């Protein structure tokens, strides 16, 4: 889970067979309480249970309409944000697929290293005035 600028605020390593909606629910429980969270997700997170869960007060889940649903109001506004989400996902996936960890602990440590490195790059780009916060080009040697 990340901000619109690509800064990771929560992450989890799970089995591929685990329901992503349950992982999302667990990550939300560990976020610092705020007045509200708006989650922009893909269609796979569509769940009436998740949207109506009383334990997720203040949660707004935005996702595209399914093929058999009428398009949601403002769906066109989500497109650029979803492209950014995919870009962040691609950046992390590219780095995470080459972790070389041989044990679950090693994989977790390597994933944490990469997320920390991306966080440091975003922070540095913000502090130096780079308009492209997720730009990793200066650090890719």
Image (cartoon, rainbow, N blue to C red):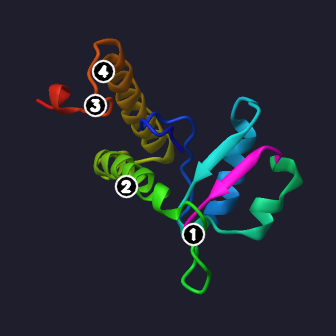
- Residue found 71% across the figure and 29% down from its top: 32
Is residue 76 in view?
Answer: yes
| Numbered circle sitting on residue 83 | 2
Is residue 18 in view?
Answer: no
Q: Marks 4 and 1: CB-CB under 8 Å?
A: no
Determine the residue located farthest toward the left in the rendered image.
Answer: 141
Q: Which residues are magenta?
A: 57-64
Separation of residues labelled 3 and 1 (CA atoms): 29 Å
4 vs 3, front mark:
3
Q: Marks 4 and 3: CB-CB under 8 Å?
A: yes
Q: Which residue is mark 4?
A: 125
Separation of residues labelled 4 and 3 (CA atoms): 7 Å
Q: Residues within 10 Å of mark 4 (few under 14, many from 20)?
A: some
Q: Which residue is mark 1?
A: 44
| Mark 2 or 1, nearer chain start | 1
- Residue found 64% across the figure and 46% down from its top: 38
Q: Is residue 58 above or below residue 65?
A: above
Mark 4 falls on what kind of element? helix
| Residue 84 x, y percent position in the rendering | 38, 49
Question: Which is more toward the observer, 128 or 112?
Answer: 128
Q: Which residue is mark 3?
A: 132
Count of labels in the image: 4
| Residue 131 x, y percent position in the rendering | 28, 26
Q: Marks 2 and 1: CB-CB under 8 Å?
A: no
Mark 3 falls on what kind of element? loop
Q: Residues within 10 Å of mark 1 (few under 14, many from 20)?
A: few
């Amino acid at each position: 889970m990340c901000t619109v600028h690509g800064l990771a605020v929560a992450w989890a390593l799970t089995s591929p067979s685990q329901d992503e909606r349950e992982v999302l629910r667990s990550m939300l429980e560990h976020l610092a309480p705020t007045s509200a969270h708006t989650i922009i997700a893909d269609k796979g997170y569509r769940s009436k249970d998740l949207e109506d869960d009383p334990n997720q007060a203040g949660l707004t889940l935005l996702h595209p309409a399914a093929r058999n649903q009428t398009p949601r109001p403002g769906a066109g506004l989500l497109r650029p944000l979803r492209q950014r989400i995919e870009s962040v996902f691609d950046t992390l996936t590219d780095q995470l697929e080459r972790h070389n960890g041989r044990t679950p602990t090693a994989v977790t440590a390597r994933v944490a290293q990469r997320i920390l490195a991306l966080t440091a790059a975003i922070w540095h780009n913000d502090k130096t005035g780079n308009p492209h916060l997720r730009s990793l080009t200066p650090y890719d040697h």
